[in-house]
Image (spheres, rainbow, N blue to C red):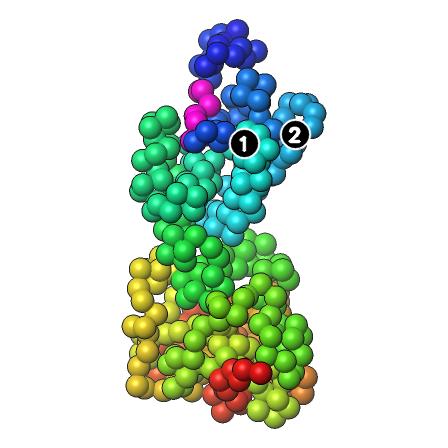
């Protein structure tokens, strides 16, 4: 039998089981091997189970326990960032009702990364400060470098997912590129919603998932003097994108989605230029046919009148300004109308 912090775990005596680590009152992290004793000995009521995949029954059969399972590999490009909001909501709710335990295989990277994100929001601290707090009780705590970069992006967005943030848009595109390379296709839920289908052709209400406050302001970008909030087919007036869907690039300078770490450290005000481009580069949107699977490149046609608006290429393409953009999903400036949002 092996005793860990006052409770007994039914383990091989020759195997050293790492003890659970307290992050703050009521919140703990631990390795998978410590789960049985931790759940019973700490009075856990809420459990976040992280794995690739997570265990089928991480509670060990303990009844009446709320569990959140997160599928996340401990790799630099594992998608921690988009799972943080659900995890933090679960932790917040759990702390109001009892004790919360976050576990991963070793209790050092994935579970610590989630706990770090929680402290960053609850204590208004940065990544280093949150990790310093955690390491007081867990000297082995060390999220991988990719998770650290994602947590820094989380901090730069004010500890929320800002759909209009340039670095976050690049992050989600890089995620889709990896998904397509690995699966041979992109899940329909991975691309951004079709703003025209969501709000109708005449409405100016922001589409699902983006608040009015997070819409990118009109500013210079690869699409001309202003990105604009409403981007519509010039022939039929069908709304095809919003300014928040536009991806900024410096004319003559490339934009690689995998450089989101660098973009997170830059001000988007540095991306403007007096030079205009003939293309408006966009995030992948649900109306774009054939981008989820099939050919690497192809036409982008208006979903209403079927006129060609632009082109897509998962490998990348060169803008008229000589900038290489990868991947690229663009509409031609001459095929769309770009208008500012009009209140009322």
**Which corner quadrant holds the C terminus?**
bottom right
Cβ atoms at labels 1 and 2 below 8 Å apart: no
Query: Does the magenta portion include 73?
Result: no
Apparent side of residue 127 relative to residue 63 in the rendered image (left or right): left
**Alpha carbon distance from label 1 to label 2:** 10 Å
Image quadrant in which you'd find residue 134: top left
- Name the residue that disc number 2 marks: 65
Apparent side of residue 72 relative to residue 145 in the rendered image (left or right): right
Apparent side of residue 101 relative to residue 254 in the rendered image (left or right): right
- State the residue at coordinates (39%, 79%): 219
Which of disc 2 and disc 1 is earlier in sequence? 2
**Horizontal and vertical percent for residue 15?**
47, 13
- State the residue at coordinates (67%, 87%): 305
Judge the density around disc 2: few (<14), some (14-19), many (≥20) Cα neighbours within 10 Å: few
The answer to whether 68 is drawn above or below residue 32 in the figure is below
- Name the residue that disc number 1 marks: 100
Residue 109 at least partly seen: yes
- Residue segment shown in magenta: 18-23
Image quadrant in which you'd find residue 49: top right
- State the residue at coordinates (56%, 36%): 96
């Amino acid at each position: 039998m092996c005793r860990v912090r006052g409770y007994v775990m039914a383990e091989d005596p020759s195997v050293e089981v790492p003890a659970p680590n307290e992050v703050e009152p009521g919140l703990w992290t631990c390795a998978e091997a410590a789960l049985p004793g931790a759940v019973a000995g700490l009075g856990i009521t809420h459990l976040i189970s992280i794995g690739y995949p997570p265990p089928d029954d991480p509670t060990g059969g303990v009844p009446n326990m709320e569990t959140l399972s997160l599928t996340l590999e401990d790799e630099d490009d594992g998608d921690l960032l988009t799972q943080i909001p659900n995890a933090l909501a679960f932790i917040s709710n759990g702390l109001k009702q009892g004790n919360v335990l976050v576990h991963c295989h070793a209790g050092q990277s994935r579970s610590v990364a989630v706990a770090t994100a929680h402290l960053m929001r609850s204590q208004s601290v940065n990544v280093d400060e949150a990790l310093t707090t955690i390491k007081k009780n867990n000297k082995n705590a060390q999220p991988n470098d990719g998770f650290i970069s994602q947590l820094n992006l989380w901090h730069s967005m004010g500890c929320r997912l800002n759909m209009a943030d340039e670095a976050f848009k690049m992050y989600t595109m890089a995620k889709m590129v990896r998904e397509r390379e690995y699966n041979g296709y992109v899940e329909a839920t991975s691309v951004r919603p079709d703003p025209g289908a969501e709000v109708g052709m005449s409405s100016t209400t922001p589409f699902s998932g983006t608040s009015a406050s997070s819409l990118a302001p009109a500013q210079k970008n690869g699409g001309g003097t202003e990105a604009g909030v409403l981007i519509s087919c010039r022939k039929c007036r069908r709304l095809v994108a919003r300014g928040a869907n536009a991806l900024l690039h410096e004319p003559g300078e490339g934009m690689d989605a995998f450089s989101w770490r660098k973009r997170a450290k830059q001000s988007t005000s540095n991306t403007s230029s007096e030079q205009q481009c003939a293309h408006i580069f966009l995030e992948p949107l649900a109306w774009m046919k054939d981008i989820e699977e099939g050919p690497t490149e192809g036409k982008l046609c208006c979903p209403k009148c079927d006129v060609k608006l632009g082109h897509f290429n998962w490998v990348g393409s060169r803008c008229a300004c000589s900038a290489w953009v990868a991947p690229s999903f663009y509409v031609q400036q001459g095929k769309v109308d770009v208008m500012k949002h009009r209140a009322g």
